[in-house]
Amino acid sequence: MSSYEERWERFLNPELVRPSLFMATMFITTFEILKNSAIDRIRDFFSTGWSEEGSTVSQEYETKVLSRNRSALYASLSWVHEYQVINDQDLETFELLKKTRNLLAHKLFEVVTGQTESNHTDQFPVLVELLRKIEVWWVVNVEIPSNPDYADADVDEEGIVPGPILSLQMLLEVASGNTELLEGWRRGRAKLHRRAQPDTSNIATKEPPCA
């Protein structure tokens, strides 16, 4: 079979195109979550309140974070690197992940149809782990210490599932066709709906007396 025929075989085969497209889009989505995590976590940390335009931040955010780089993303990565949230190897990994993300974003059709090689499937767990590393640091070093309910509590970092990771896990399940989460959500709503209904079991059912 010629390479021309092989490309058409792959392009027209749902069993090959569907998982390839799924993983490519999940990689792009997760990379965006990683970027948002790196930027938003720090911005929220320096937040001072809210205005009509959204959250407001202190001047320190400008001087201690944004002044590091014209890019808010790279300024944020520099900040978390300084505070040892991530290390030099993580920064190198981020650049590799970024190259893969750009390849997928600009040549998605070619990657999905097998015309361009990409190792995004193998890199996906690495991407998720970097996201988790950043999120867990914030949970352990900021959220838990500021919550009196966790005072003097022993924290198992391995058992922490940050919000973005949980949302990503749910998205993976739903996108792969799993309906258990939907069914559970529907059951929960039905239970709440039943609880909200007035109890009429003790109301008399006899006809009211005639006037």
Image: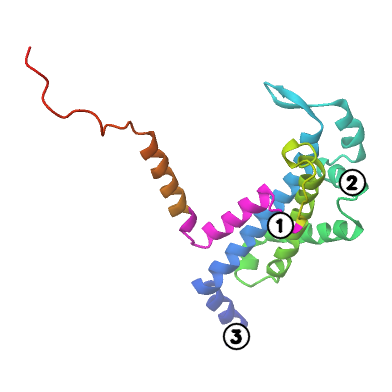
Mark 1 element type: helix
Please state, as top left, top right, bottom left or bottom right, where the C terminus lies in the image: top left
Which mark, by number, is residue 78?
2
Vertical relation: 123 (above or below) 152: below
Mark 2: give few (<14), some (14-19) or many (20+) Cα within 10 Å.
many
| Image position, residue 32 (x, y; %) | 70, 50
Inspect the magenta stretch and tell me whether residue 72 lies in it: no
Which mark, by number, is residue 170?
none
Name the amino acid, label 3: Ser
Name the amino acid, label 1: Gly
Task: Determine the CA span between mark 3 and mark 1.
Answer: 50 Å
Task: Determine the CA span between mark 3 and mark 2.
Answer: 49 Å
Inspect the magenta stretch and tell me whether residue 159 lies in it: yes
Mark 3 element type: loop
User: Is residue 20 toward the left or the right of residue 30 in the image?
Assistant: left
User: Is residue 19 toward the left or the right of residue 142 in the image?
Assistant: left
CB atoms at circles 3 and 1 under 8 Å apart?
A: no
Residue lying at the far top in this picture: please name it. 211
CB atoms at circles 3 and 2 under 8 Å apart?
A: no
In this view, the mark in front (1 or 2): 1
| First in sequence: mark 3 vs mark 2 | 3
Mark 3: give few (<14), some (14-19) or many (20+) Cα within 10 Å.
few
